[in-house]
Image (spheres, rainbow, N blue to C red):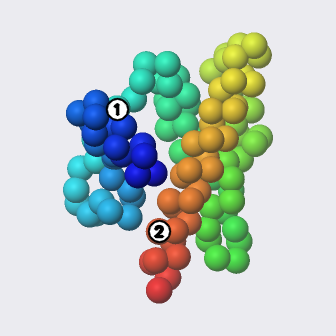
Amino acid sequence: MDEVASDLALAGLSMPPRAAEVEEDEEVVFELWEENLDSYNWFVRLARRWVFNQFDGSRIRLDDVAVATQFAIFGLKKSKRKALLEDLLVMESAALEVLNKKKEVDRE
């Protein structure tokens, strides 16, 4: 990670803060590349479609049926679904790591 930070510094950029380093009331600004805008918008649209662990309330994954239903309702072309689903899985994985870590901290 230090190598990435060094390369960014050479370009006049810096690493974005990690979730644990950001104060709760601190505004987090991030850059969203145009090529990722559709995937981001879909992830936000699906934000209420989590499957929760019934024992501890942690999130397990996005609801596959809800995702497929949303794709159909909004008329997403089948040819675009695979690439979008791959993007959603990457965002889901990153979100689960952060959201479930926050859940663990809240329990302590």
In the image: residue 22, left or right of residue 81: left
Residue 72 visible, this angle: no
- Crowdedness of circle 1 by 10 Å Cα count: few (<14), some, many (20+)? few
Whether residues under marks 2 and 1 lie with C-beta atoms below 8 angstroms apart, the answer is no
Instruction: Look at the picture and state if 25 lies above or below 36.
Output: below
Picture residue at 71% right of the left edge, 47% below the top:
63
Of tags 2 and 1, which is closer to the observer?
Answer: 1
Instruction: Look at the picture and state if 35 lies above or below 55.
Output: above
Dot 2 amino acid type: Lys
Dot 1 amino acid type: Glu
Picture residue at 39% right of the left edge, 58% below the top:
19
Instruction: Look at the picture and state if 50 lies above or below 76.
Output: below
Picture residue at 74% right of the left edge, 32% below the top:
68
* Residue 98 image offset from top left, x and y in percent: 50, 59
The quarter holding residue 53 reads bottom right
Q: Which residue is mark 2?
A: 102
Picture residue at 32% right of the left edge, 62% below the top:
21
* Residue 43 image offset from top left, x and y in percent: 55, 37
* Residue 25 image offset from top left, x and y in percent: 23, 60
Q: Residue at the bottom extreme?
A: 108
Q: 58 or 66, which lies in front? A: 58
Report the disc number at residue 81: none
The quarter holding residue 42 reads top right
Distance, label 2 to label 1, CA atoms, is 23 Å
Report the disc number at residue 31: 1
Say which element carries label 1.
Answer: loop
Residue 54 visible, this angle: yes
* Residue 78 image offset from top left, x and y in percent: 76, 16
Say which element carries label 2.
Answer: helix
In the image: residue 32, left or right of residue 10: right
Instruction: Look at the picture and state if 25 lies above or below 49.
Output: below
